[in-house]
Amino acid sequence: MKRGRARWIPALAVSAAVAAAVTGVVCARTVSGPAAAPAQGLAVGSTLPAAKPAAVRGNQPHAYPLQAPLVAAAARAFADEGQWRVLAADSRGVPVVQGTMLRAAGTSSPVAIAWIKESAARFELHPGYSQPGGSWSQPDMVPRDRRDGLVATWNGGFLMGDSGGGFYLGGKQYGPLVPGVAAEVFRSDGSFTVGVWGRDVTLGPDIVGVRQQRRLMIDGGRIAGDIDSLFTWGVTDGGATYVRRSGVGVTADGDVVFALGPTMSPRSLATALQQAGAVRAMELDINISWPSFMAYDSSADPGDPRPFKWGDYPRAAERYFSHSARDFVAVYARATGSQGECVDAGGVARWRPGGDAPGQAMAC
C-alpha cells in the first residue's frame, strides 16, 4: 500500500486533537495598491482584518469572484471555516485555485480543501520512477523548463498492485484499465475529470492519461454505501481508522475539488469532498508520508515558481521539483501574464512571510 501564476500563503499548521492555527493569510491579486503591511497570523477563533477597497486601474475595480462559503457563519467551528481564499490566479484575474478549511466529520481536525476552475487550468499526469515504474514520455518530476504557469500539484494513489486498476500515459499502459474502477482521466486538450472507467469515460484518441484506483467514494453526489468498510479504502498505518487521507473529485459544473486532512476516516474524507461540491470523487493516497497539495508563487521568477503547502503533511513543498518515486498531477493556468500586488481576502496588502524586507511590496 502506498502510504499561469500563483499567490503566496504560509504553510497551514494543524493539530490532530484540536482545530489548529492558520499561521498566515492568503493572497489575491490587485493591479496596484498601497504599501504592504506586515504579515499577521490568523489563529483559530480570530477574524480577518477589516476589509479595504481593492485597487483599481482606469476606475475599473479588479474583483475576484470566490466560491460561495461552504459553512454558514452561525455554524462555523472556527473562524472563517468554509470561506474561500485565492491560492492562485491567472493573468486575467481568474482565481484558478481557491482554498478553504473545514472541520473533518468525526474529528476535531480541519481538512484543507482546494477548488480548481477546470476551464481555466490544464492538467498533466506524471509517472513516478517506482510507481508505476518503467520509461514514460512524461518526466517523473516537474523540470525547470516546464514550470511556467504552474499553479498546483497533488499526490497520486495507492501502489499499483493495490489500486485494483491500471495506469495509462501517452499511449503506453501499465496493467489493464479495468471497467468499473474509479479513474482520474486526462485529455489531450488539458481537461480533467474523475469517473468510472467504462461508464463515464472510455479509451479514445483524446485520452492521454488515466490513473485508476478502486471505486468512487462519491457517485451521483452520494457517498458510497460501504464507506465505513476500512478494507475497501486501503490498509492504514497500524490499522488505524483515522489517518492522513487525500481525495479528488469533480463538481456538477466539471470543476475539480481536492481534500487532504491529517486525521480522517473514509467517511470524513468523503463528507469533506461532498461538502465541497463533488458529485463524483475518489480516494487517492493515504497514511503519513504520501498525501500533499502544493500551490505555486511565481512572483519572483515566472519560470521557476516557489511552492507552498496547502494542508498538513510532512512532505517538502518542493517535492515534485525532484525525481518522484510516485505518480502525481501537475496543474497549469491556461493564461499567464503580468503580476500585481498581493492582498488577503479582505483586500489588505501583505508582505511575503519570512521573505521580503520592509518597504518591498509583495508582488504575486
Image: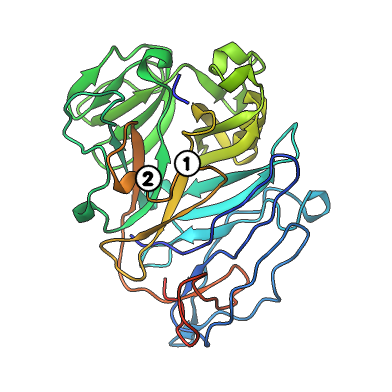
Percent coordinates x, y for residue 358 in the rendering = 50, 85
Percent coordinates x, y for residue 151 in the rendering = 38, 54
Identify the image quadrant of residue 128: top left
Question: Which of the pair 120/3 is nearer the observer?
Answer: 3
Where disc 1 sits, the SS reads: loop
Question: Which of the pair 191/305 is nearer the observer?
Answer: 305
Mark 1 surroundings: few (<14), some (14-19) or many (≥20) residues within 10 A: many
Identify the image quadrant of residue 269: top right
Where disc 2 sits, the SS reads: helix
Percent coordinates x, y for residue 302 in the rendering = 29, 66
The amino acid type of the residue labelled 1 equals Ser
Q: Quadrant of the N terminus?
A: top left
Q: Quadrant of the C terminus?
A: bottom left
Q: Residue shown at 66%/27% (left/top)?
A: 242
Which residue was labeled with disc 2? 319
Tag nearer the camera, 2 or 1: 2
Specify the label residue 48 is tagged with.
none
- Of the numbered discs 2 and 1, the one sitting upstream in the chain is 1
Q: Is residue 224 visible?
A: no
The number of callouts visible is: 2
Identify the image quadrant of residue 240: top right
Badge 2 vs badge 1, beta-carbon distance below 8 Å = yes
Question: Which of the pair 164/291 is nearer the observer?
Answer: 291
Q: Residue shown at 43%/79% (left/top)?
A: 31
- In the displayed structure, does residue 53 sit left or right of residue 32? right
Q: Residue shown at 53%/42% (left/top)?
A: 313
Q: Residue shown at 57%/45% (left/top)?
A: 312
Which residue was labeled with disc 1? 292
Q: Is residue 223 above or below residue 263?
A: above
Percent coordinates x, y for residue 345 in the rendering = 60, 67
